[in-house]
Image: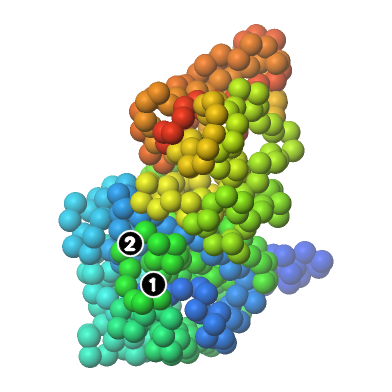
Amino acid sequence: MSSRVSRRSLLVSAAALAVSAGPLATVARAAARTPKVLVIGLDGALLSRVKDAAAPHLGALMAAGLTAPSSIYANPLAPTLSGPGWSTLITGVWPDRHQVKDNAFTGARFDLYPDFLTRVETAKPALSTYAVSSWAPITDTVFSTKVDTRVSTPAAEYDTGTTARAVARLRDADPDAMFVHLDNIDHAGHSHGAASAQYLDAVRTADAQVGEIVAAVKGRPRYAAEDWLIMVTADHGHTDAGGHGGSTLQERQTFLIATGPTLSAGSVRHDVKMPDVAASALAHLGIAIDPAWNLDGRPVQQPAPDDFDALRGQLGTRVDETGIPASVVGFTHAPPAGWSVDNSAMGTGGVTEWRGWSFTTDEFWTQSQRDQNRECNVRARNVFAVADGDEWSDKSLTGTFDSTLVSPAFPVTGGRSATLAYTTHYRHESPQKGEVLVSYDDGAPVTVKTYTADAPSRAETLTLQVPAGATRARVRFRYTGGNNWYWVVDGVKISQV
């Protein structure tokens, strides 16, 4: 406790000095505020139903900060269950890393990928960490014993008790990082379905409890000297009839509502993913994210849009894909500035949406056909590029799928190595092939990577040896095949140290 008091005394002294600094006083005072994090998890909550419920407290958070609808995985990566969902949110990695596949947590690798509060305790043990949950496995299993206080609320008290404990902690103690889990929305979804009045009532009850917790934050005596990042999220969605675990888009829905520094009021983003919650909490507390941790999350405070994301406003609705709802906006063939698609060897006909490389979203592409691993394309964000020979072949066609996605020219320095980085999700069936080619100063392209076997979602990095004298490098992604599978590419960049 003394180390925390000492730290805050220094911060107050810094703020006092800043007041006498004239025009820079406001900036200095802001810098002196103590960073704190609150994460509230609403089990089984659907953002669409939060909006239907006209929930005032969650609505106020959305108006004050960021709203980011998102989607998660399905089998075979993991079913849309609470165990994998909360493990992903709390550790900052997808299920292929933390290895939680069900609610029994069998095979979990929390030793390699610990919860974010444990990382806080490891990096800054003087900070106070607290977790309280209405579903005991979260505080008993996902959060480790390194967390200062873990409370599993007795079943008889349920969310009422969890809320009261969170409010009391904020009122009576000095937490630096908190996690609070509320469960009743999920209970209503199982009992009555997401389309029910009871589900809406549960959303409204949870909204009032969120309001109590946020009011406790704002009622703290030192609130003006504190810098709170508040994040509200969910582990999965629910079907209208009730239940989850499957691959429908409704079951795969999640979201992040966040208020804090650098997050614009009333903003909406589509590049945020589940693992970002943990990474954002760590970044806000000033904890550097070590690349050796292999986190999948990135801080929401540090957006990193790529060229494909600029296409979101240009996306259109379905043409031939009758399985995709007519209202869903989500594909274009027009590449972003500097990019091109070479379809000179591409067959004719086929399903319009997927003739050659297309630019699409998870919401659109996964609904073209479920349960063929498209839902496992978890490391692409927002708008991504896809070559889908399987879906293209679902309508009369001639020829084969042969399309090449061509990047802009990246600046390079000759005679030095460079790194080509991108995310990929490749499902293979012979004679299909994916080739990555690089050309320098628009010379002959050279193959640097070939895909002829399944390569599930991952971040790919390839080392390039840049020829002496070269000043520009261009990347080509060529997909060839027929009625086979698909290839996703996103986040393409070339860098040199």
Q: Is mark 1 on a helix, strand or loop?
A: loop
Q: Residue 246 carries which label?
A: 2
Query: Residue 369: x and y, percent?
Result: 43, 51
Q: Is mark 2 on a helix, strand or loop?
A: loop
Taking depth in this image into account, of 26 and 306 the one nearest to the observer is 306
Kind of residue at badge 1? Thr
Q: Few, some or many C-alpha atoms within 10 Å of disc 2 (few <14, some 14-19, many ≥20)?
A: some
Q: Which mark is residue 239?
A: 1
Marks 2 and 1, the one that precedes in the sequence: 1
Marks 1 and 2: in contact by CB < 8 Å? yes
- The relative height of residue 322 versus residue 61 in the rendered view (above or below) is above
Kind of residue at badge 2? Gly
Given the current orientation, which residue lies at the most extreme front position? Answer: 396
Query: Residue 331: x and y, percent?
Result: 62, 49
Q: Residue 72 carries which label?
A: none
Please indicate whether residue 59 sits to the left or right of residue 335 in the image.
Answer: left
Rendered residue at 26%/82% (across/down): 153
Rendered residue at 59%/81% (across/down): 59
* CA separation in Å, label 2 and label 1: 9 Å
Please indicate whether residue 308 sits to the left or right of residue 213 in the image.
Answer: right
**Quadrant of the image containing the N terminus:** bottom left
- The relative height of residue 39 versus residue 210 in the rendered view (above or below) is above
- Please indicate, yes or no, whether residue 463 appears anywhere in the rendered image: no
Given the current orientation, which residue lies at the most extreme top position? Answer: 468
Query: Residue 362: x and y, percent?
Result: 51, 53
* Image quadrant where residue 469 sits: top right
**Quadrant of the image containing the C terminus:** top right
Rendered residue at 59%/36% (across/down): 349
Rendered residue at 44%/62% (across/down): 249
Query: Residue 255: x and y, percent?
Result: 49, 66
